[in-house]
Image (cartoon, helix red, strand yellow):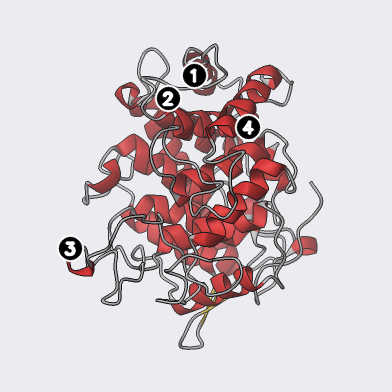
Amino acid sequence: MFHQLAWSVCLSLSIATLGMTQAVAQDGSAEVGKTELARQQAVRQGVDYLRNHGQADDGSFTAQAGPGLTSLALTAAMRNGLTPDDPMVSKGLKALEGFVKPDGGIYGSGRLKNYETCISMICFAEANKTGKYNDVLKRAKEFVTRMQYGAAGDDAEAWYGGSGYSSEGRPDLSNTSYTIEALRAAEAAPNDPAIQRALAFVSRCQNLDGKFNDTQFAKLVNDGGFYYEIPKTAIDPSESPERFTPNGGLRSYGSMSYAGLKSMIYAGLTPNDPRVKAANQWIKMHYAVDENPGMGSGGLYYYYHTFAAALDVAGVGQVTDEDGKTHDWRADLVAELAKRQSKDGAWANDNRRWFENDKNLATSFALLALAHCGPQPAATQPAADGPQPAKNP
């Protein structure tokens, strides 16, 4: 399964063990045990919300949004211990199967073909222990590869290797990150040509001057963080100071910086690569769990998901911030999410941007983040000083 390909795989506990005191970490730490019990409680309540309130009679979650939210909810449930045989998951998978198209894509109206297919691939891969979805994944892999910008074109083109919501229009880092994750979920190796093309685009979305980013923006901020898209038209910084610096640079922000780091890891980069070093430095300078750095409350739950996934697969156990303070990011994130959880077990963002006011969406992102926050086995405890060498898939 895909999560087993990560550098430092977090152990998912079964729902049957949630809330039991013997789940304390192997090192016996009372503080870690307290965090784990809080995580279990938050997961149990979040899954209960999805089961009892989030899922429609047909098995879907927020069906008007297409298959994306259904895929996210089911993936979150499975990564937190539920199996494909669980009634909620089984019913949801059946609903998701209805979106599989003859062209290999897995989507609804077609407006979000690539995004929905990638999210669905990750879900089907999570449920594929018996090989039931082998053919679906194979055909979907071919589909998203065809959707990639400039797949057979000029690698000097700024958008080369990127993926967008569909085959039309500009690519962006979020969709490209999902594409890389989906390809890995379909058992593509890091050196797969489609993943390496995507890496070229990811590198051009990093504020890092050097041979990997030849766009005009590389020198303007140069802080090692990542931005969402690469503009091709003239920029007036005054029109969107949230996105642009006064000199026309593209501001780095949290969710994209973690998505960028995660993508580079899945594409096979090592800790010694200058891109990984720069991303790790940006993280140290902008560590936060109370906001999406650079975006505040905008996209907060998506940020929590990329934050946890990137640090987990990078093998980072602790982060030392710009003031020299060391953080157990798992403990910090569990505490923050527990504080934000509603009495009904759901999460929702008061900031409606990117639809995070939808409880199914925010709850799925929160549960996906919590799946990366379990106690680490002593033999593979992540180091505190940054990403470690990748394990062989």
Which amino acid does the dot numbered 4 rest on? Glu
Question: The residue tagged with tag 2: helix, strand or loop?
Answer: loop
Q: Which quarter of the rendering shows the N terminus?
A: top right
Q: Quick check: 5 above or below 390?
A: above
Which residue is disc 1 drawn over?
A: 96
Q: CA distance from mark 4 to mark 3?
A: 42 Å
Q: Quick check: 111 above or below 259?
A: above
Which residue is disc 4 drawn over?
A: 126
Q: Nearer the viewer, residue 106 or 163?
A: 163
Q: CA distance from mark 1 to mark 2?
A: 6 Å
Disc 4 vs disc 2: which is toward the camera?
A: 2
Q: Nearer the viewer, residue 339 or 205?
A: 205
Which amino acid does the dot numbered 1 rest on? Leu
Question: The residue tagged with tag 3: helix, strand or loop?
Answer: helix
Mark nearer the N terminus (3 vs 1):
1
Which amino acid does the dot numbered 2 rest on? Pro
Name the side, left or right, on which 393 lies relative to 113.
right
Which residue is disc 2 drawn over?
A: 67
- Residue 86, position in %: x, y? 56, 22
| Residues tagged 3 and 1 counted as in contact (Cβ below 8 A) | no
- Residue 298, position in %: x, y? 28, 56
Q: CA distance from mark 2 to mark 3?
A: 34 Å
User: In the image, which disc is placed on residue 239?
Assistant: 3
Label 2 packing within 10 angstroms: few (<14), some (14-19), many (20+): many
